[in-house]
Image (cartoon, grey):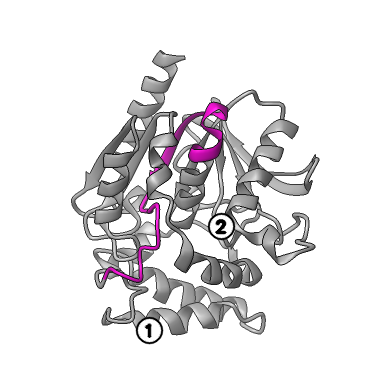
Amino acid sequence: MWKREVVSTKRGAFEVFTKGKGAPLCVTHHYSEFNETGDYFADTFTETHTVHLINLRGAGGSVEAEEPYQLGMLETVFDLEAVREALDYEKWAFAGHSIGGMLGVLYGIFFSEKLNGAVITGSAARDYATLSPACIYNPSHPQFEKMQQLIETLKLDTLSEAERKERTMERTKLSLVDPDAYPALFDKPIHKRIASERLNFFNREFPLFDVTRKLPWITTPVLILCGKFDVQCPLEYSVEMEQLIPDASLIVFEQSNHYPFLEEQEKFKAEIQRFTETLAARA
């Protein structure tokens, strides 16, 4: 189980779950609501880092948004910086998966000097759905309607825990190379929810999101990881980031979809260990 604490900052109080040992690392997702059971992606880093898994504004026990704009991506990065300051870290690293990775990109653009490094997994620096038919969030994708129905269902507060678990499984299977591997990959008693207010605001903000021209501003080392068959954030967007971020490297997982940290777990952990050692040598 992860240790829970509420961290008071100049921007409000945030619920933080901590586990692991080593250099400090921030992990979050733009619209997930975490608890003491943790998170599969965050768990990957607990052998190499002291991981701080953060519930963002409006999620779990964190401060509520007083104005809608406070749920925006840039405001969220300002909130994360406030948490870092409150925890009294001069610097920390950041790791994000999917939309969490987009936050990591923004963090690097605006606060590279506060980051020892960043790990961006299955993500993008711009709207990855509108122009890519390979993306399951593009209306032309054959599984678009099914994904949208599942997302809308998971927003409902009326779902029983059993129903929520079943719908989450159905949604996740759409983003695995081998859907039948789900029981073996997702075998921990981890449960989290969607922070629907944050997701709804993100859906309004997302079509305007494009920070590709600012990627050269990122000066911290960045490790980009992506599954070859990623159906949510297609590989082309990771390639784009690797080309535009000055100190970036890209590792492609040949047998993965959107969850390389589970689908090719040992290789993923080895790459994290290698990157961690590289950062330590630079310090």
Residue type, mark 2 in image? His
**Does residue 213 appear in the picture of this structure?**
yes
Q: CA distance from mark 2 to mark 1?
A: 22 Å
Which of the two discs, 2 and 1, labels the residue nearer the N terminus?
2
Please state the horizontal and vertical placement of residue 1, each as a whole percent of the image: 62, 47
* Observer-nearest of 4 and 94: 94
The local secondary structure at tag 2 comes to loop
Q: Can residue 268 be seen here? A: no
Compare residues 65 and 144 and report the one nearer the observer.
65
Residue at coordinates 64% horizontally, 23% vertically from top-left?
90
Q: Residue at x 31, y 80 (%)?
A: 143
Q: Is residue 80 magenta?
A: no
Q: In this picture, which residue range is highlighted in magenta?
A: 108-132
Residue drawn at (41%, 15%) of the image: 282
Q: 162 left or right of 144?
A: right
Q: Amino acid at mark 1?
A: Lys
Q: Position of residue 163 (x, y in %)?
A: 54, 81
Q: Where does label 2 land, which residue? A: 30
User: In the picture, residue 92 is in which quadrant?
Assistant: top right
Q: Identify the residue under disc 1.
A: 146
Is 131 covered by the magenta stretch?
A: yes
